[in-house]
Amino acid sequence: MAGNTWGQQFTVTSFGESHGPAIGCVIDGCPPGVAIDESLLQRDLDRRKPGTSRYVTQRREADEARIVSGVFEGVTTGTPIAIIIENTDQRSRDYSKIKDVFRPNHADYAYLQKYGIRDYRGGGRSSARETAVRVAAGAVARKILSERWGIAIQGYLAQMGDIRLGCTDLDAANDNPFFCAEPARVAELEDYINQLRRDGDSIGARIDVVATGVPAGWGEPVFDRLDADIAKALMSINAVKGVEIGDGFDVVAMRGSEHRDEMHPDGFASNHSGGIQGGISTGQAIRASMALKPTSSITIPGDTVDTAGQATQMRTTGRHDPCVGLRAAPIAEAMLAITLLDHALRHRGQNADVEPSMAPLAGGPMF
Amino acid sequence: MAGNTWGQQFTVTSFGESHGPAIGCVIDGCPPGVAIDESLLQRDLDRRKPGTSRYVTQRREADEARIVSGVFEGVTTGTPIAIIIENTDQRSRDYSKIKDVFRPNHADYAYLQKYGIRDYRGGGRSSARETAVRVAAGAVARKILSERWGIAIQGYLAQMGDIRLGCTDLDAANDNPFFCAEPARVAELEDYINQLRRDGDSIGARIDVVATGVPAGWGEPVFDRLDADIAKALMSINAVKGVEIGDGFDVVAMRGSEHRDEMHPDGFASNHSGGIQGGISTGQAIRASMALKPTSSITIPGDTVDTAGQATQMRTTGRHDPCVGLRAAPIAEAMLAITLLDHALRHRGQNADVEPSMAPLAGGPMF
Amino acid sequence: MAGNTWGQQFTVTSFGESHGPAIGCVIDGCPPGVAIDESLLQRDLDRRKPGTSRYVTQRREADEARIVSGVFEGVTTGTPIAIIIENTDQRSRDYSKIKDVFRPNHADYAYLQKYGIRDYRGGGRSSARETAVRVAAGAVARKILSERWGIAIQGYLAQMGDIRLGCTDLDAANDNPFFCAEPARVAELEDYINQLRRDGDSIGARIDVVATGVPAGWGEPVFDRLDADIAKALMSINAVKGVEIGDGFDVVAMRGSEHRDEMHPDGFASNHSGGIQGGISTGQAIRASMALKPTSSITIPGDTVDTAGQATQMRTTGRHDPCVGLRAAPIAEAMLAITLLDHALRHRGQNADVEPSMAPLAGGPMF
Amino acid sequence: MAGNTWGQQFTVTSFGESHGPAIGCVIDGCPPGVAIDESLLQRDLDRRKPGTSRYVTQRREADEARIVSGVFEGVTTGTPIAIIIENTDQRSRDYSKIKDVFRPNHADYAYLQKYGIRDYRGGGRSSARETAVRVAAGAVARKILSERWGIAIQGYLAQMGDIRLGCTDLDAANDNPFFCAEPARVAELEDYINQLRRDGDSIGARIDVVATGVPAGWGEPVFDRLDADIAKALMSINAVKGVEIGDGFDVVAMRGSEHRDEMHPDGFASNHSGGIQGGISTGQAIRASMALKPTSSITIPGDTVDTAGQATQMRTTGRHDPCVGLRAAPIAEAMLAITLLDHALRHRGQNADVEPSMAPLAGGPMF
């Protein structure tokens, strides 16, 4: 109810503040018999970790995940998996500047109105640091999706500022610090970020994420549509302001004759729908996008008020990302993985006996 | 778990198929002492109802809602409110054409893969007819939001095809069949739809919805962010493929210095964020948008397969909307209302004792 | 959250007041492809129905259940099944005597304190009439449990007042109006009830319920233990004040060497545990009991207060059960069935891939 | 869904195995502004802790709870409170005797059938060690119940074997290792346990728990009745086989004229109902009982089978409680506290606006 749990059959309960002792999560409902260990989590955590390139925040967290339950002799037992990541880089510092001032475009003011109290150290619970535990939980979900259904999930940077990027090589997204799937244009991104830093400003980004291998039939028809849950999953990531499935907002100007994905005996002919119809997966690739706002932690001063309601100004110094979207691809992948696995288990709970009378169609093209 | 319930404290459980005996819902957790009757529901139902103008489907449903529980002597008692809408326009007709053929861009194929069976009459559970019960439940939520917090919610058509519409007169959206808030351009929309009909094609649409008067503090910080739940609420509406909060996808190309909503002692200076920060309402107007795809129920034949996997073609005749977005504004309003009220009640469950040390800031401009 | 929904994967959402227009429920998450119709529900409804013998209330309700969704061509589709039972015996009567007076041992006072309003007609939502919808939903669950796992569920009267009854013939419980499984003693029960009526008083009862054929492995280890959920299921029935699993309160005076169910290669040697260990079914018969209080709707006057807090007296006339336990066996069966099916589906959602390395043991004796 | 979370508005998610690295929980939905620290948890943990008297298991766990989130500057922030208790007494030992053998009356067999794998070290997840985290979470709930509503909760030993105990001095229950509220009879209990140890056997127990100060109006009418949730809460405790509210199973032989709690202008005249009517609290003291079975970890050998299905015998040596009920009072108190607080917050979420027209009646006598 207080909303720190995701999912219904494969659930992730997240806890922790940016500068508290630790962050972590409890995964409940994980199928038993899955081989996992800390190194599995670490691979994905390292992809999201701050301080890995000069284009992201220089906060240095070891981000070492420790599994304290639910795994025995190297495999999951079906009982809750608790994952704890100690916060090691909690420098003792002077918070007096932010303690009584609301940073514009941050959660400071809303938290104080809601709770009457807030942990102002580094944003507390509203910090993007919380997303590390999503990535850890997502690593477990991805392992299962991959092993049992052959599902692969990959996110990439589709746009940063005015730079629109294609997807010429999906695998290459993991080989550069921008998660750019059009490797020839990485230098362009580097220049852009360097200029931003000089300007003391920040920029938004668009991340696309694709899941291949998802069988037809996952998702629920009405409220808990698979696309609705994916929309929630992505919108729940810090700084996200928009979400699309398949062609997304482009459908507004499309005609029905153009948008419909025709079906042939050898499979779907196109994938405008992004792999979901009526809230249920079709066997096509699942495609989603999200828009991340430019962070307001910038050095250009901005007007704000203090906790006494008096006018003041705010200027953020210190370790910050000029484009928070640059580290968001692994988070999007994780949330998509958790959401898919949750729906997979829900689906088979109700429909394990179903034997479709017709063999599934081939998924057809990704885009 | 099978996903036909929305909400946690104010819940709506929906049931019914397009051509079954009835559709309806059960509202649980409604505060007691609220004056409601069928006429309240009817006002909103009539706004969504098919057959009300020549621009929408000519299916004629009375859409008369009957309240069978939870209301006593004209006010809610706090117990479940069951609402039933009998399906009156279930013409006996020949379904042989669609029984064994999958309509492209519909849920037919996905349902059969999921359940091994489907009610093919008019789309069964996947029909937009289901949204009538959302509108009925939304009417109850709106009444409470209005009475207790002074909240007003209004949706309008922001784009249809290439026609981008402004919001010059929000109230006027209820005065034309397009929910157009720029009344001077209604004739343009009429021409567009008439041409579409002649082409036998359909078109997408974009609906914007605004809630004013929402106090600061509603929403939860991590997964159940208010914006995440709004995203899910809107994406769960039939045909929706994209959702935005505030500036939405425009943030991708914005700088932090431009996007942040500065705060002054007399209130917020702008509303790029759409009224939500860190998942929690700020007291600004809440702004959301959704993109609806063009329906594939068109007269231009399209390739498809039948349930034996053989190639065939589909051409939809009969009563259909050329632009399903035209009736979607009341549905978006209803889902926003239900989501807001659910969060309002959840918030006060946890935080009823909180007395914020600072008076709330004025919300500032809507856009 | 307002608590009118049972279950997580197979859910039942109940609605309706004793003297409102209708009662009913929505079943969500029902597996598709199950043949059900109204006659299936009616068989169990008739077993619970008032007015069927001279030993129970003479209220005459047709209790005709109507299925309005989720069933197509005679089988479930996997979408929500809405069941509606119209209240036909709402005699127009004078409620002035109970409108402003709290009946002792009823929910009247608690409802008014909770909601500030109550539907006083016949107890409104707190009436045992609500249990009819549980029985209808239970009939669906029983069908599935029987068809897919061969599970049989039977309740019987184990004690009424000081009369302790054995279980000499479980099947015979359905052949007499007392659900007595020791048929030789039915006359004794008749005499007892007749005397009670003359005294204008009421009496408590104990109902036992048994499920055979439940496979090992259903239930969850910690909070959602199968026995914990059964305890909740039975305690949620009107008038129930105690619940037991297996030997129940007798274990207090038992030694470990006596209570443990030893295991042999040919099966369990005893069933003190009632078929559940660590919250999970063992393959033994599941045995549970519940204690129902004597109704306070009696003709002997009792002290009470009115809604102004003034002293007064209450004496109930009209149609009432001298022993509400006499109609409770079908309700206990229904709640057990719903709970078992919910856990069955939850279990396979998480563990559908599990292949136990050892064949299941035989369940052994029932008692 | 996998059932390791309790509650809806004040939720507790439990994790950890008996001999894994750590156990713990995440509390979500805790009201903000409550002063808590580790010492608060420790007081209750120490009451449940093993090794504190010669009458309980000699396993020595420090049971030191560490709060790693959700508390800032000594008060709760409204965000999730994660509590971790490291397992310090995981002696390296030889598990070969229990690895492949099912202990009778334990969860071993059921777990293996469910998950295909089990952590056999000390019972893994099925160990009563898990209840330590419930006690820690319960300490937080009790603090809030006490501070905001003046509620006090106390459990005591009501029966052990054939020794039935009264409640002559409720406060004294905390002053002896038996939680005995009839202090004159402690010596009798000591003798009984000493004899049991000599016999190498174990015994059952009955624990009663009382909450005073609970206002009228908490609980939900149908499935989530307050008594139903208390029944589930208590039945979810290891070894519990029976639960009662108020007079419990004694109601079976009571008449309505005897059982009803009459109401006078100065309050309730009796408390047979245990403080709950129609699932909702009445303002009377809430009384519940639970029966705990005798542990089967005894030195008298018992028949069982191994994981190959072959006959063998089991004899438990080492550190075990001859009466697990002796440490159960704090666990019952904790579960009652968590359940009450959850319902308190749920109630005010829906009904915060309700102003009952009548002042509450005095609760009257406890028994």
Image: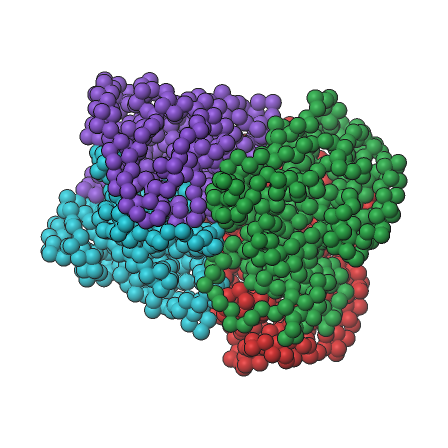
Chain colours: A purple, B cyan, C red, D green
Relative side of A304 to D279, left or right: left
Identify which residue is drawn at 30% across, 65% down: B43
Residue B182 position within the rendered picture, expressed as x and y whole percent measured from the top left: 15, 54
Q: Does residue D131 sit above or below B213 in this rendering?
A: above
Q: Is residue A21 visible?
A: yes
Residue appearing at x 63%, y 34% in the figure? D64
**Residue A130 shows in this picture:** no
Q: Nearer the viewer, residue B253 or C167?
A: B253
Residue name at image x 87 percent, y 46 percent: D187
Q: Tell me where residue C287 appears, x and y as whole percent.
A: 71, 49
x, y percentage for residue D83? 57, 37
Relative to C182, does residue A242 appear above or below in the rendering? above
Q: In which image quadrant can residue A202 be found?
A: top left
Q: Residue at x 57, y 25 (%)?
A: A75
Q: Is residue B73 above or below residue A315?
A: below
Where is residue B321 drawn, in percent x and y? Answer: 23, 52
Identify which residue, C31 or D11, lies in the foreground.
D11
